[in-house]
Amino acid sequence: MPEIAENAAAPTDRQALLNELRWKKFPVLDDGFVCLVDIMGEDSSIVQAARVSYGEGTKKGSDDRTLIRYLLRHRHTTPFEMVELKFLVRVPMDCWRQWIRHRTANVNEYSTRYSIAIDSTQTTPADEWRTQSQTNRQGSEEMLPADVGEKLTAAERELQELTRRVYQDRLDLGVAREQARKDLPLSTYTEAYWKVDLHNLLHFLALRMDSHAQLEIREYSAAIGRKIVQPLLPMVWEAFEDYRLHASGLSRLEIGCIQRLMQHAAANGRVPPLSTEDFLAVQDPSWRELTRSRERDECLAKLQELGLVTR
Ligand SMILES: Cc1cc2nc3c(=O)[nH]c(=O)nc-3n(C[C@H](O)[C@H](O)[C@H](O)COP(=O)(O)OP(=O)(O)OC[C@H]3O[C@@H](n4cnc5c(N)ncnc54)[C@H](O)[C@@H]3O)c2cc1C
């Protein structure tokens, strides 16, 4: 059998870290939290599993960090499934509705058929109401002015108090909990145990820490990632940041644009960054006739980030 990786955290340090993290509630939003209940495995468990398949040769050729980075970079995913994490989370139901779409986790949620709904709703401070994004139909943009926010927050408070009162009246009149709850707002907090293997957790974090995800679930995933996964699995986290979170892929079409842009620059004796007009001149032919193209916009944004086209 392969040995456990040599540079795993010393057992006492690891135990101290686990003692510090387990059951610690990291606050998210106004009354939510994420909390690690348990973890099976560490960085070295991934290395240990990978060495079963790659054999002893890898032990000489690469250290643990290098191997983890290789596995993550090349999407050799199964060794990451050897690590399991269990969380207790408290989340508003609108956010939970997005969370629960990740089917590869195991879930037990607080039952509002069995118990009275948690008496807490997520509230929005006056300075945190966001406007609808003009470019992303699913996203938000900037903050609304404070005076508008004051009115929205006051109306929110009124609505949440009303729905709670109606809910309580129904219970007092003997209505079953399963029916009494039907008009509770999506801002009502729920709690759940959520267990997931590390491969699927990283998939969740990549999607939900991304700027396209809703701000609220981004706050939850950032808390899980940075407060819990990062300290417990430092090598995995480093590789995840490098190859997933802050990485970007190029499609065949985008590679073609870059090649033509460089040829265009060389032919005209210029050096990047070039202009948006230059980019439009070398864009993929399939985008040329389109007045609006999301794919073209995304390509332009990548080239701007690479410093090949001016912002
Ligand atoms: C920014 C954003 C916007 C979104 N917008 C919408 C929206 O408008 N409407 C909407 O309905 N959803 C939306 N979603 C949810 C999205 O479509 C996914 O359902 C969600 O992100 C879960 O991803 P997943 O299926 O990859 O994860 P998991 O369910 O955890 O699955 C992980 C992986 O396992 C595999 N897998 C799991 N189950 C199956 C299966 N039954 N068959 C085959 N393969 C499987 C797949 O490879 C999958 O990628 C959005 C998600 C994000 C991040």
Image (cartoon, helix red, strand yellow):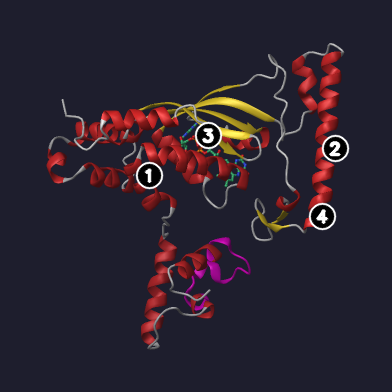
Q: CA distance from mark 4 to mark 2?
A: 16 Å
Dot 3 or dot 2, earlier in sequence: 3
Judged left or right of residue 123, residue 89 is left
Which label was assigned to residue 237? 1
Farthest residue toward the bottom?
269
Mark 1 lies on a secondary structure that is helix
**Disc 4 residue type?**
Val
**Disc 3 residue type?**
His
Judged left or right of residue 102, residue 241 is left
Q: CA distance from mark 3 to mark 2?
A: 33 Å
**Disc 1 residue type?**
Trp
Q: CA distance from mark 1 to mark 3?
A: 20 Å
Q: Which residue is mark 2?
A: 158
Dot 1 or dot 4, earlier in sequence: 4
Q: Which residues are magenta?
A: 280-296
Q: Which residue is mark 3?
A: 102
Task: Confirm or deny contact between disc 2 and disc 1 (CB under 8 A).
Answer: no
Mark 4 lies on a secondary structure that is helix
Which label was assigned to residue 256? none
Mark 2 lies on a secondary structure that is helix
Q: CA distance from mark 1 to mark 4?
A: 41 Å
| Disc 3 C-beta below 8 A from ligand 1 | yes
Residue shown at 53%/44% (left/top)? 208
Judged left or right of residue 228, residue 211 is right
Would residue 295 be counted in the magenta stretch? Answer: yes
Label 3, residues with CA under 10 Å away: few <14, some 14-19, many ≥20: some
Q: Which residue is mark 4?
A: 148
Dot 2 or dot 1, earlier in sequence: 2
| Mark whose residue sits in front, 3 or 2 | 2
Hey, which quadrant is residue 118 in on the image?
Answer: top right
